[in-house]
Image (cartoon, helix red, strand yellow):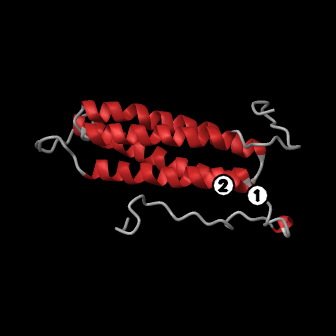
Amino acid sequence: MSLDNLSGLPEWEDDEFDDEDKDGEAWKPNPTKDACKAMYEQWKEVMTLLNAAFDTDHRPDEPEEKDENSEKSFIAHSKGMIIGDAYQVAVKIKSSEVGMYIIRMENASIIRKNAQFIKSNMLTMIAEGVIAEEHGRLIRSEIDNFRELFKAWVATFQKDEFEDEWGLFN
């Protein structure tokens, strides 16, 4: 991660998932793609805050423990899960632009689950003294902002002719 990109995420590329079949339609408004891009940019803000919060451990130094069941091990594992889920949110946002309703719905479900997990875990990170309370509250607030963009994005979905073989998104 460089100082030019504190979120650690790649920039949004408008033509990344453009399909050759859509030649001549580039001029048409695409509210789903616009909402997706806004959501991705907001998630980059969340990632920047998460990276900053986790770069500074606010707990006093303790002797190294070799026990994998130690508190330090638990905190390190928790941080890894949170960051992993946060990166997965970004991947699912970008990969939603393939255009299929079922893929969008599946990705939306994963995005929602991961964002809720991260938001709730900020309370644990605050309580354990891993991050400053201000950082945790700011991250939670940015996830709330993200949620509003998420709801606007999902409202743009249009069901297509493909059927979900599992019956979940029919």
On the rendered image, what quadrant is the N terminus found in?
bottom left
Which picture quadrant has residue 148?
Answer: top right
Q: State left or right for residue 42 relative to residue 33.
A: left
**In the rendered image, is residue 52 in sight?**
yes
Q: Mark number for residue 29? A: 1
Q: Amino acid at mark 2?
A: Asp
Q: State left or right for residue 4 relative to residue 64.
A: right
Q: Mark number for residue 34? A: 2
Residue at the right extreme? 161
Q: Are marks 1 and 2 in contact (CB under 8 Å)?
A: yes
Asked if 37 appears above or below 82 in the picture, the reply is below
Asked if 139 appears above or below 26 in the picture, the reply is above
Q: CA distance from mark 1 to mark 2?
A: 9 Å
- Identified at 60% across, 50% down, the residue is 93
- Percent position (x, y) of residue 119? 42, 35
Q: The residue tagged with tag 2: helix, strand or loop?
A: helix
Q: The residue tagged with tag 1: helix, strand or loop?
A: loop
